[in-house]
Image (cartoon, rainbow, N blue to C red):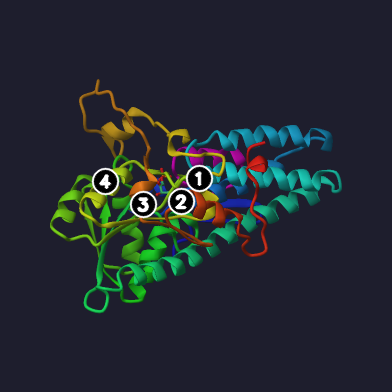
Amino acid sequence: MIHAISFEHGRLRYLDQRFLPLKEIYVETKDYRRAVDAIKTLAVRGAPLIGIAAGYAAVLAIAQFKGKKRSLKSHMAHALAEIEAARPTAVNLFWAAARMKAALNDAFETFDIPEIARRLQAEAEAIHHEEIANCAAIARHGLELLKRDFAHVLPHQRLTVLTHCNTGTLATGGLGTALGVIKVAYQEGLIEKVYVSETRPLLQGLRLTTYELEKEQLPYEAIADGASGFLMQREMIDFVITGADRIARNGDTANKIGTYSHAVNAAHHRRKFYIAAPVSTIDSAVSSGHQITIEQRGNTELTSIYGKSVAPVKTLALNFAFDVTPASLIAAIITEKGICEKDYTRSISTVVAKPMNGHKPLQPALLYD
Ligand code: MRU
């Protein structure tokens, strides 16, 4: 069992993913700045998990406040701004920060600081529990979609799937998004093998997805990022499924760098390319992928492996952490509230508006005020 993140007795506890699979190091902290740092350094990563960590970071921030109530709001505004500045692409970070902000505003006039703190913790735990439930619902919808789309082959053969980056328990705290669909489809006898692309530069596929598949005893093979086209040419991949960091209103999807190349390869070889993500990853304020901020990270992530430099010292590296796959290349977007298909603008607005678990979805105005 993987425990990616938890919050107990006023402490945030997370598995530091930078050291996996070689070392399983758990970190405990009462300091919100340490939680922010965990997000920045990718000790905690994956869009839904970043959102969960952001919620708990806000809980730590209020616990660290020692002043009078009149200055609580400015302390929290400061802390939430630091949390939001940790990474720019995964919208779940801003979405979770907005929920914490709304919880603070709702409680502020009526309650004292200890009660406000309790309410913030309840909100962070709600975000965490919802993301776990979302994964299970995404997996259910994904399974139905695969049974529909591969109805013609499934009676005779099982499927091979390619996935990119890590979208499992380590990225969500639950079953996973894309990897959750794969896990459940495997349990149901639909999957023969999972191809895992290494995901340079930080190797989330090779280090983390393999770690999860190994633990859950799914058959897998790692491949180089550049190998997907060749495998499709040889008819070794039936479909591709990945997660998302931000989905625009028109379905354009930002995900780990390399995702777009897999989607282009899939289109050329007439393979289905799916996205699996919770509705919290949809950014209703963004109309197309052009408006999504793409994180650029440091040189050395690309020029070194496990801290050891593998390029000439003066090598300049262009290290975009994400790319954008246009909606036209995506066969379906699987969410916890159902499946979006073309026309995405219509189907995405329908799932965003659909209530779930008694929670009203946040309006864009509230998310970005
Ligand atoms: O830089 P990372 O490791 O945070 O990037 C993660 C991804 O791109 C995932 O595919 C995405 O967040 C979906 S996680 C369910």
Q: Position of residue 35 (x, y in %)?
A: 55, 42
The reply to whether the C-beta atoms of the residues labelled 3 and 1 are less than 8 Å apart is: no
Q: Residue at x 27, y 34 (%)?
A: 304
Position of 104 with respect to 351 (left or right) is: right
Magenta extent:
27-46
Which amino acid is tagged 1? Answer: Arg
Label 3 to label 2, Cα distance in Å?
Answer: 10 Å
Position of 243 with respect to 29 (left or right) is: left
* Circle 1: element type: loop
Which one is earlier in the sequence, the residue at label 4 or at label 1? Answer: 1
Q: Which residue is mark 2?
A: 344
Q: Which residue is mark 1?
A: 249
Which one is earlier in the sequence, the residue at label 3 or at label 4? Answer: 4
Q: Which mark is residue 264?
A: 4
Q: Which residue is mark 3?
A: 330
* Circle 2: element type: helix
Q: Residue at x 67, y 42 (%)?
A: 366
Residue farthest left in this picture: 234
Bin the neighbour count of mark 1 within 10 Å (Cα to Cα): few under 14, some 14-19, many 20 and up. Answer: many
The reply to whether the C-beta atoms of the residues labelled 3 and 2 are less than 8 Å apart is: yes
